[in-house]
Image (tube, rainbow, N blue to C red):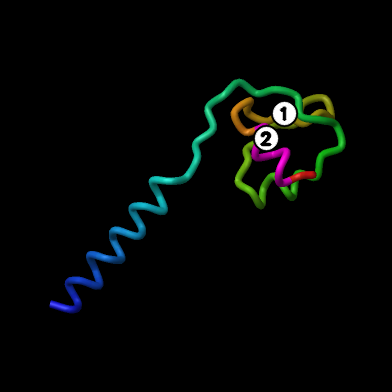
Amino acid sequence: MKVLMRYFTLITILTIICGCQKNYSGEYVQWGETVDTKKLKENDIPYEIKDNKVFIPEDATKKATFCCT
C-alpha cells in the first residue's frame, strides 16, 4: 500500500510540474541587439536572431525583463 501511495504521489507531482510550464505563442518582437542569450536559455525563453537583433515572443517580454535586468 505504501509503494502504491508513493507512485501516486510521484505521478501527481510530475503532472503538476509538466502542466505548469509556460508555452509562449505570441508574435516575435525585437528585444534588443546586445542581449545575453545565455540568460534567455537558462530561463527557458525562446528567441530568434535576425540581422544581429534578438527577437522573443511578445508574451515572454515580462519574464525576459525580470531575468535579464
Q: Residue furthest bottom?
A: 2
Q: Residue 55 carries which label?
A: 1
Residue at 76 percent across and 44 percent down: it is 68
Distance between mark 1 and mark 2 Cα atoms? 6 Å
Q: What residue type is labelled 1?
A: Phe
Residue at 82 percent across and 30 percent down: it is 32
In the image, taking residue 49 as reference, residue 25 lies left or right, namely left
Magenta highlight range: 61-67
Query: Which quarter of the picture shows residue 11?
Result: bottom left
Asked whether disc 1 touches disc 2, contact meaning CB atoms under 8 Å apart, the reply is yes
Residue at 63 percent across and 25 percent down: it is 58
SS at badge 1: strand
Q: Looking at the image, is 45 positioned above or below residue 9? A: above
Q: Closer to the N terminus: mark 1 or mark 2?
A: 2
In the image, taking residue 32 as reference, residue 46 lies left or right, namely left
Q: Mark 2 points at which residue?
A: 47
Query: Which quarter of the picture shows residue 52?
Result: top right
**Does the magenta portion include 63?**
yes
Q: Looking at the image, is 8 positioned above or below residue 68? A: below
Q: Looking at the image, is 43 positioned above or below residue 25? A: below
